[in-house]
Amino acid sequence: MRVIAPADRNAVRRPPGLPAPRPFRVAFAAAYALAYLVGGERRMLRLIRRYGPIMTMPILSLGNVAIVSDPELVKQVFTAAPDVLLGGEGVGPAAAIYGSRSMFVQEEPEHLRRRRLLTPALHGAALSSYVPIMENSARMATRSWPVDRPFEMLTAARSLTLDIIVKVIFGVDDPDEVRRLGQPFERLLNLGVSEQLTVRYALRRAGALRVWPQRARANRAIDAVVMPLIAQRRNDPDLTRQLDVLALLMCARGDDGEPLSDNEIRDDLITLMLAGHETTATTLAWAFDLLLHDPDALRRVQAEARSGGEEFTTAVINETLRIRPPAPFTARVAAQPFPIGGYRVDAGTRIVVHIIAINRDARMYEHPNEFRPERFLGTRPQTYAWVPFGGGIKRCLGASFSMRELITVTHVLLREGEFSAVDERPEKIVRRSIMLAPAHGTRVRFRPRETRCLPI
Ligand code: HEM
């Protein structure tokens, strides 16, 4: 039994929460889960306003969930010891797609070992070497877009970010090879953003996650392309000179001098492909949605795209991630009773960090619901009041990569042509499985800057 330390003495009450009377607990938990699925983030924000910065809510399939929405409390969550709040356990439904051996769902010390080995591939010299790939992919993407006809930026952004991540990970350039390597990952990713995942997770005790033929097929298809590639690279005398993610992972050594096994490398590749593709594509679609409805901001980003400046564009991406974070929340699971905000959260409770509520805290941001990129000029986002990438030892490992990709790609696209919004107003936020996406995928029109040679 855990003794409550003096500092915890006041922290013996459970956080306020939505009712779930004992005989009807399951019915209430199902109703709240359904209300969230239907009512989405708006409903959640209303509840947060009513119940305060920490509240509990029974949700079918997740149990009693504590929702945290205050920067000070979030700091306590993100800085808690990793054996007190479990990060891997907190991943929830997505773990079924990443797989149980992914570093994303591992606990310490294994998580940190794998994270350290992955870090150089997404930062520093490696990251700089990916910029020409990002630029070239963005330029080529516009060649296939319809001219002056509406299309969905989200769909186009998905193809573009997939193209980039495949090239960066595997060091390939041939379009057929890029397609061959990307396809099986895309299949797994599509399962990850399908409603099937949410439903199967809810029914996991009945075995709905253990037996999932489509997922098994997608994983087999990934093995069929990735494992031979790893074997081939093992015999490549130039491996140490290559800067693609696969080569860097194959050459990485831990503190004990041990390399990653082939299976660990495969799992890391899956993690990067899945974590980095949909999130970045959705943010790109949101950035265009917001920019195309704000002519002044658009002009300033266009000017930077021409001059090579990045200050305002960085502010635009920061502001996009503030009011339109693609991931609505991240979570940790309490391994033991956890005192927070004057309350005590029971062991086993999932603590959900509500990203939008924190990013729109009216005490931290003037006009919190408005798109005002200027607020980030000359100042960096605050660690616990701007959390689109989560925080602590599980903070998004691809944050620098995705910022670089979003800025680079936005500039190239704006240099390549003129964009206009199809819809008069900015898009509504809708929940698509575990992502928050623009309701109609951000419909845009595009006109290339130079006349293209049309095929005869
Ligand atoms: C705008 C784009 C992105 C957003 C908004 C985003 C958001 C997130 C969030 C919220 C988490 C959970 C953090 C936590 O629980 O504290 C996360 C984790 C992670 N992300 Fe991202 N992500 C993005 C792009 C990327 C990219 C491009 C990559 C890789 C190429 C990536 C790789 C990862 C990995 C590996 C983790 C797990 C980190 C760990 O467990 O230590 N992400 N991301």
Image (cartoon, rainbow, N blue to C red):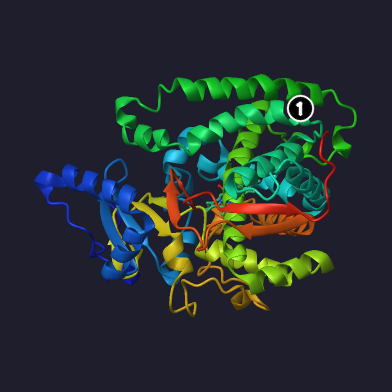
Residue that label 1 marks: 177
Asked which quadrant contains residue 411, the reply is bottom right
- Describe residue 434's horizontal placement relative to residue 22 as left or right: right
Asked which quadrant contains residue 294, the reply is bottom right
Asked which quadrant contains residue 310, the reply is bottom right
- Describe residue 186's horizontal placement relative to residue 250 as left or right: left
For the question of whether residue 347 can be seen, the reply is: no
Up-down relation of residue 10 to residue 151 (above or below): below
Residue extending farthest front: 456
What residue lies at 81% left-to-right and 40% top-to-bottom?
Answer: 454
Q: From the viewer's side, name the closer residue of 47 and 294.
A: 294
- Describe residue 450's horizontal placement relative to residue 433 as left or right: right
Residue 398 rendering spot, x and y as whole percentages: 64, 51
- Describe residue 132's horizontal placement relative to residue 220 as left or right: right
Quarter of the C terminus within the rendering: top right
What residue lies at 30% left-to-right and 55% top-to-bottom?
Answer: 2
- Whether ligand 1 has any atom under 8 Å from the Cβ at mark 1 is answered as no
Q: From the viewer's side, name the closer residue of 279 and 19.
A: 279
Up-down relation of residue 206 to residue 382 (above or below): above
